[in-house]
């Protein structure tokens, strides 16, 4: 592979990762992914767990669905959502777990192992 092709490939990777991080950049989308980690739920079930309006929830579900993160199925009048991408769930779990550890005042995390800048709490 020539140098230009390697650079193009690396650029594509960074662009794809940036798009994924942009998709996950809102707390409500992370909450939705977290709520669906243990199985599919309909909009009413998600609204019972996540404090937001129905229109806002629908907008975020639609965005995650169009991006391929969520799958859905219709059962009569209900639409059930499920995680379509286990990789996204794994990434969210890893980052959220790390941040939760860092926010714990009792946790001792080496500076080099921190995600949060300056040990922010």
Image: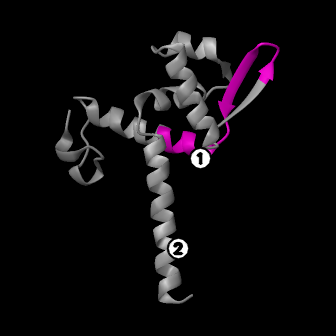
- The numbered mark, 1 or 2, whose residue comes first in the sequence reads 2
SS for callout 1: helix
Check contact, mark 1 vs mark 2: CB within 8 A: no
How packed mark 2 is, by other alpha carbons closer than 10 Å (few <14, some 14-19, many 20 or more), is few
**Residue labelled with disc 2:** 9
Tell me the quarter of the picture where residue 88 sits. Answer: top right
The reply to whether the magenta stretch includes residue 5 is no
Residue at image point 48% right, 51% down: 19
For the residue pair 99 and 30, the one nearer the viewer reads as: 30
Q: Is residue 69 visible?
A: no
Residue 26's place in the image compared with 9, above or below, is: above
Q: Give the residue furthest to the left.
A: 118
Where's residue 35, x and y in %? 56, 24
Which disc is residue 87 wearing? 1
Residue 11's place in the image compared with 26, above or below, is: below
Where's residue 39, x and y in %? 67, 25
Q: Give the residue furthest to the right.
A: 76
- Horizontal side of residue 84 vs 4, given as left or right: right
Residue at image point 72% right, 30% down: 72
Write down the region rendered in magenta. Answer: 74-92
Tell me the quarter of the picture where residue 44 sits. Answer: top right
């Amino acid at each position: 592979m020539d140098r230009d092709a390697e650079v193009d490939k690396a650029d594509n990777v960074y662009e794809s990762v940036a798009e994924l991080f942009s998709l996950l950049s809102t707390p409500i989308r992370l909450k939705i992914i977290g709520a669906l980690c243990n199985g599919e739920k309909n909009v009413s079930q998600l609204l019972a767990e996540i404090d937001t309006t129905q229109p806002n929830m629908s907008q975020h579900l639609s965005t995650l669905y169009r991006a391929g993160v969520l799958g859905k199925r219709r059962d009569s009048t209900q639409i059930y959502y499920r995680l379509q991408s286990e990789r996204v769930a794994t990434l969210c779990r890893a980052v959220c777990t790390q941040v939760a550890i860092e926010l714990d005042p009792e946790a001792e995390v080496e500076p080099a192992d921190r995600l949060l800048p300056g040990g922010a709490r």
